[in-house]
């Protein structure tokens, strides 16, 4: 809907009523309605413009309905159009008023000017008022027989609109068969195309109830109709061509000569300037030849060039859409594209979503002949400024290595990565070297020599650290220092936050022990002791298991922990081939872009909780660091934040709450999970507090700020706060629940709430944490003002415990 | 719905709107909301894209230009909608309005090429291709039937055509045969890959130690096409770990923008010296050496030559009017031209 012009907005500040202006307009319109003076159309136009701009900013101008209709008796098309817009907008909410307009719209349907006839018919059908359908049938019937194609075109869409208002009226008037007749006989291709889309929609909807309709739907993809449409395809507009081509993909030719006829006919569509037409044609080609293997291969060759051209022309959005389709094809037939690998090289300023796709394709097309070039190119990206892409490209190098072409050169490259002295490069490379060694144990010598030089202090990321520790354990006989490195790692057990790393450390020490017992014995003892005392359940269990099996029989333990290993030949593929085929069947649809078959994102049960919206988080952070923002804007942003995150938080809060309650009940505790809170005993919080986001939002707006303070965070808390979720869980254990959170390091923003025990008095908290300065800005609002200080102390003590094990 | 159909349609809508309104932003749309509404009404109905061909739309809804404003003042008739429906909706040539008349019959053909290249730090050409367009601006009376042929069509790797181009003559003889729309349009686009050389070279040298990085970049002409290379620019992003930069050049100007983008505009290369940029970058205190090296993006423009080597052979009009003026131009620009260091 068109927003108003700037000047008019300034005249009417956003007050909702604007009553005086409306009555003013009413008077002026009434004066003009009867006037036949020259230039009256111009003044009417100005007035109409004003009315519509009021309408779009939400002022109710429906009281002008009568005057507007009176004024619309004119030959000026622009006036008519504005009037139709006005009528269309108010008819839905005011069926009584809509009845008034029927008359003049019906009159316009018989106007001399085909443009007016068409417009009136379009507006008439767009009223969408159920009890007026009887007035639609007549004008639609004559519209379908109109001598002008413009009117017919509008009437066809009108039939579809009628069908959606009242299916029975539409079918009773026998419109579908009229449309069918028009589709096969009309001279104007746009009319034909509109008939086709209308019939497809109507018959698909009817097919479930009527056998005849489903037969008619089948008839649309009969040889007769398909050939009729294909023979005229060049006359259709580009959009209609897409429609026809989509229909052709459903057609099953009876013999192979037909397939070639169709492909010959459509070949030049691949050269069309409109990418949508090209892609639709590609789909036809692929679907038609599915059963003919060698022709299918030729089709790949044929469609390659047009698709590659599409990628390099047009906006990033267009190229992403095309690239996603190419990605699918590359995955199905990498060898076809192996000589075109240079097209998948990344350009410096491409958006990273395009780069990521290209990296995947480069990985897929690598073979004996091009691996060297591709890996060289990928190594360039490893030095890229864009760190996620750099990581991604190192992973790509690793994947290519696992495809076993020219492993020798790649291993050298990976080892070079390790020497680049960049933390993230080292981290990624370590993980890859580990995978590589699992597949090619014969390279262990070269790798271990380099890996041995890496100081474990420089490796911080859990995955990389785990990989390094795995190698220390696995190849401890080749690495001189292995036991001692492991020993120093065990000594720093408490500083290791990741349970994954601790698990690996346990196993590595065990392996090392079996290879070099005298050097490792003390480390093993320390590791088992630390492991058994570990608060993480898995670590604790594994340590206990190792301890017991060692006590039971050392040689059995060795067989369990350190069996001879077979090299891994194939790493599991993440997506099943069935799903890939499913996606291929849905070529040229969103399924390809999402890399999921459609049922996964259209069916309700497959739709996961909403992904956390990063940009929302950033948005609120921008505002958080900016202290002088008007309170209204803060509130607006808060609203956004709440609305988008609410759904996810609700579900998550629900789950974790249930889980923790389960344990509480199991242990027979009716108390909050952490009993030693040094808080004033008079304030107890309800562990099962519940509040829905909209109520939160409402209360947040109503309540005054009871307390506002700045708290200092301990260094442990700062270290633990890598993602908002960590704090959420912690606060939850203190009966302070999170309703929304956002942000990325170093800025986080949280909204918490808590409820007084056995009372429904709520506390609301906004907490903005900056981890680089280690400060938290806390604003507390309370329904019961007298206890706000007590709650604040509680909140502070809960926050201060964050990060301490 | 096919995703590309949606994206293409939106692109088309924005093209049409900016064509009508001479730009596209919030204010322009607010000021012309009636026209925007009228256009959208014709372009899409009930979710189906209808007419998006600018020539037809222009017949249905007159653009808000000065001429129509003047006309409305003179005649007092301000309707910006033509009285008759366009004939073309029913004709087989949807892109051409019915029978325009011109006193001077003119047709201009422009070859506009963009060179995309990636060059490695050792000067090796990683990838080099040209994306080109043939743009035609025709003002011809009646229904002109044009044929355009190239001297060397075999170098084209892939082509895409405006709907007006007939496919068969191209397939058999590589001749473009078409009835042009009125005014300016893109007749075809093409791609030429595997080019062997670039018109200019850029040699960056970066050496880094002791918390500093010395930069030296040379730019020069590689192959003399006989045409001057204009508006040469060089842009690169300084790595985030750089504290300060001191860069000077012997030709042109060097600017370091707020977002750590350094841009060096050279313009034309002088005859007597090779443009060079040199200076030092100071790294953050704890860094010894620079690990991330910038990528240089190069811009240039060459008038009068299509670097792909594509040449137009001839342009014929089947029913030649008495006076026909034909004009040809060529232009090559840098597209994504990158030099790594």
Image: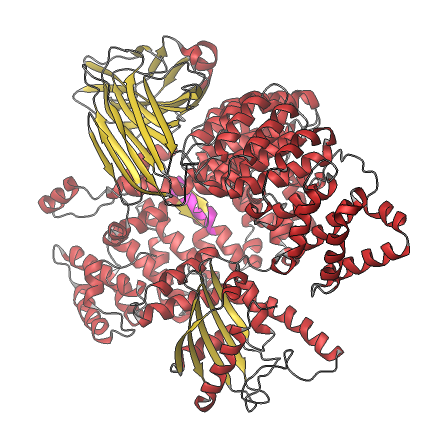
Residue B70 drawn at (x, y percent): 11, 43
Residue B70 visible somewhere in the drawing: yes
In front of the other: B227 or A257: B227
Horizontal placement of A629 versus B48: left or right? Answer: left
| Residue A684 picture location, percent across and down | 57, 87
Residue A259 in the figure: left or right of residue A127: right
**Residue A505 spot, x, y in % from top left:** 70, 51
The structure's colour scheme is: secondary structure
Magenta residues span A143-158
Seen in the image, is A284 located left or right of residue A277? right
Location of residue A650 in the rendering, given as x and y in whole percent from the top left corner: 57, 69
Please say whether residue A184 is visible from this viewpoint: no
Task: Determine the residue located farthest toward the front in the rendered image.
Answer: A518
- Determine if the magenta segment contains residue A604: no
Determine whether, in the image, residue A421 is placed left or right of residue A659.
left
Q: Looking at the image, is A478 positioned above or below residue A495?
A: above
Main secondary structure found in the magenta portion: helix
Compare residues A175 and B180 and report the one nearer the observer: B180
What residue is rendered at 57% in x and 46% in y? A459
């Amino acid at each position: 809907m068109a927003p108003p012009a700037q000047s008019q907005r300034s005249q009417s500040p956003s007050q909702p009523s604007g009553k005086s202006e409306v009555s003013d307009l009413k008077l002026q319109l009434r004066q003009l309605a009867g006037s036949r003076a020259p230039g009256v159309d111009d003044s009417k136009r100005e007035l109409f413009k004003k009315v519509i701009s009021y309408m779009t900013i939400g002022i109710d101008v429906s009281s002008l309905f009568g005057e507007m209709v009176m004024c619309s008796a004119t030959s000026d098309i622009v006036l008519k159009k504005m009037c139709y817009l006005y009528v269309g907008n108010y008819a839905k909410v005011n069926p009584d008023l809509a009845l008034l307009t029927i008359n003049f719209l019906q009159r316009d349907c018989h106007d001399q000017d085909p443009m007016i006839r068409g417009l009136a018919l379009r507006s008439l059908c767009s009223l969408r008022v159920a009890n007026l359908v009887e007035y639609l049938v007549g004008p639609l019937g004559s519209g379908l027989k109109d001598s002008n194609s413009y009117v017919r075109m509008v009437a066809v869409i009108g039939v579809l609109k009628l069908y959606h208002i009242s299916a029975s009226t539409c079918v009773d008037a026998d419109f579908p068969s009229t449309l069918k007749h028009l589709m096969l006989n009309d001279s104007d291709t746009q009319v034909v195309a509109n008939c086709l889309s209308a019939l497809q929609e109507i018959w698909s909807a009817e097919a479930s109830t009527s056998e005849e309709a489903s037969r008619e739907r089948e008839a649309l993809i009969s040889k007769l109709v398909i050939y009729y449409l294909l023979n005229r395809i060049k006359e259709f507009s580009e959009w209609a061509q897409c429609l026809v081509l989509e229909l052709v993909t459903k057609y099953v030719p009876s013999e192979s000569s037909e397939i070639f006829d169709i492909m010959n006919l459509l070949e030049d569509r691949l050269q069309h300037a409109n990418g949508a037409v090209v892609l639709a044609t590609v789909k036809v080609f692929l679907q038609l030849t599915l059963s003919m293997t060698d022709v299918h291969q030729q089709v790949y060759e044929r469609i390659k060039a047009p698709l590659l051209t599409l990628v390099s022309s047009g906006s990033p959005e267009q190229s992403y859409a095309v690239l996603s389709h190419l990605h699918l094809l590359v995955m199905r037939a990498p060898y076809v594209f192996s000589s075109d690998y240079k097209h998948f090289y990344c350009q410096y300023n491409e958006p990273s979503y395009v780069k990521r796709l290209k990296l995947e394709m480069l990985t897929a097309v690598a073979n004996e002949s091009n691996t060297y070039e591709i890996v060289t190119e990928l190594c360039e990206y490893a030095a890229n400024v864009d760190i996620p892409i750099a990581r991604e490209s190192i992973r790509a190098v690793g994947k290519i290595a696992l495809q076993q072409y020219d492993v020798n050169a790649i291993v050298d490259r990976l080892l070079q990565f390790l020497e680049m002295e960049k933390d993230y490069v080292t981290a990624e490379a370590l993980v890859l070297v580990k995978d590589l060694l699992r597949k090619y144990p014969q390279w262990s010598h070269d790798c271990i020599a380099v890996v041995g030089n890496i100081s474990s202090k420089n490796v911080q990321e859990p995955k990389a650290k785990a990989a390094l520790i795995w190698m220390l354990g696995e190849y401890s006989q080749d690495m001189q220092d292995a036991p001692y490195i492991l020993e120093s790692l065990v000594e720093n057990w408490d500083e290791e936050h990741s349970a994954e790393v601790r698990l690996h450390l346990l196993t590595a020490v065990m392996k090392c022990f079996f290879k070099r017992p005298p050097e490792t014995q003390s480390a093993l003892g320390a590791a088992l002791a630390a492991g058994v005392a570990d608060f993480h359940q898995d670590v604790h269990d594994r340590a206990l298991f190792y301890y017991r099996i060692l006590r039971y029989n050392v040689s059995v333990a060795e067989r369990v922990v350190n069996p001879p290993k077979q090299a891994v030949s194939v790493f599991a593929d993440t997506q099943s081939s069935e799903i890939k085929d499913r996606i291929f069947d849905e070529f040229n649809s969103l399924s390809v872009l999402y890399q999921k078959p459609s049922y996964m994102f259209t069916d309700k049960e497959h739709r996961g909780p909403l992904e956390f919206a990063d940009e929302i988080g950033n948005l609120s952070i921008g505002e958080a660091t900016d202290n002088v923002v008007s309170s209204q804007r803060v509130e607006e942003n808060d609203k956004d934040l709440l609305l988008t995150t609410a759904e996810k938080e609700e579900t998550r809060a629900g789950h974790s709450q249930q889980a923790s309650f389960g344990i509480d009940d199991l242990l027979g505790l009716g108390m909050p999970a952490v009993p030693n809170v040094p808080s004033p005993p008079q304030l107890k919080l309800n562990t099962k507090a519940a509040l829905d986001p909209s109520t939160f939002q409402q209360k947040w707006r109503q309540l005054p700020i009871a307390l506002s303070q700045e708290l200092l965070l301990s260094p442990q808390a700062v270290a633990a706060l890598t993602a908002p979720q960590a704090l959420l869980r912690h606060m939850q254990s203190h009966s302070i629940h999170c309703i929304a959170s956002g942000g990325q390091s170093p800025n986080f923003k949280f909204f918490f709430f808590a409820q007084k025990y056995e009372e429904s008095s709520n506390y609301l908290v906004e907490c903005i944490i900056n981890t680089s300065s280690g400060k938290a800005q806390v604003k507390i609002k309370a329904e019961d003002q007298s206890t706000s200080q007590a709650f604040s102390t509680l909140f502070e003590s809960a926050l201060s415990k964050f990060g301490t094990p | 719905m096919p995703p590309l159909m949606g994206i293409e349609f939106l692109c088309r809508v924005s093209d049409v709107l900016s064509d009508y309104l001479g730009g596209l932003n919030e204010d322009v749309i607010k000021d012309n909301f009636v026209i925007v509404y009228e256009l959208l009404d014709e372009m899409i109905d009930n979710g189906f894209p209808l007419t998006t061909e600018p020539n037809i739309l222009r017949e249905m809804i007159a653009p808000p230009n000065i001429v129509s404003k003047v006309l409305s003042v003179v005649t007092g008739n301000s309707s910006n909608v033509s009285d008759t429906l366009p004939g073309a909706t029913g004709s087989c040539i949807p892109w051409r309005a019915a029978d325009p008349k011109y006193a001077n019959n003119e047709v201009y053909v422009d070859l506009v090429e963009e060179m995309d290249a990636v060059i490695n730090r050792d000067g090796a050409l990683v990838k080099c291709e040209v994306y080109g367009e043939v743009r035609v601006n025709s003002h011809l009376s009646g229904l002109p039937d044009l044929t355009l042929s190239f001297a060397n069509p075999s170098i084209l790797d892939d082509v895409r055509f405006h709907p007006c181009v007939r496919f068969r003559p191209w397939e058999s003889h590589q001749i473009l045969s078409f009835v042009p729309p009125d005014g300016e349009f893109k007749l075809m686009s093409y791609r030429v890959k595997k080019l062997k050389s670039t018109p200019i070279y850029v040699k960056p040298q970066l050496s880094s130690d002791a918390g500093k990085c010395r930069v030296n970049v040379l730019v020069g002409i590689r192959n003399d096409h006989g045409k001057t290379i204009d508006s040469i620019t060089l842009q690169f992003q300084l790595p985030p770990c750089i504290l300060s930069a001191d860069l000077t050049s012997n030709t042109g100007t060097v600017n370091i923008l707020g977002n750590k983008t350094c841009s060096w505009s050279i313009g034309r290369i002088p005859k007597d010296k090779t443009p060079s940029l040199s200076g030092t970058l100071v790294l953050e205190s704890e860094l010894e050496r620079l690990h991330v090296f910038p990528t240089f993006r190069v811009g240039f423009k060459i008038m009068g030559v299509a670097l792909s080597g594509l040449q137009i052979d001839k342009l014929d009009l089947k029913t030649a009017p008495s006076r026909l003026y034909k004009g040809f131009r060529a232009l090559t620009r840098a597209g994504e031209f990158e030099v790594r260091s």
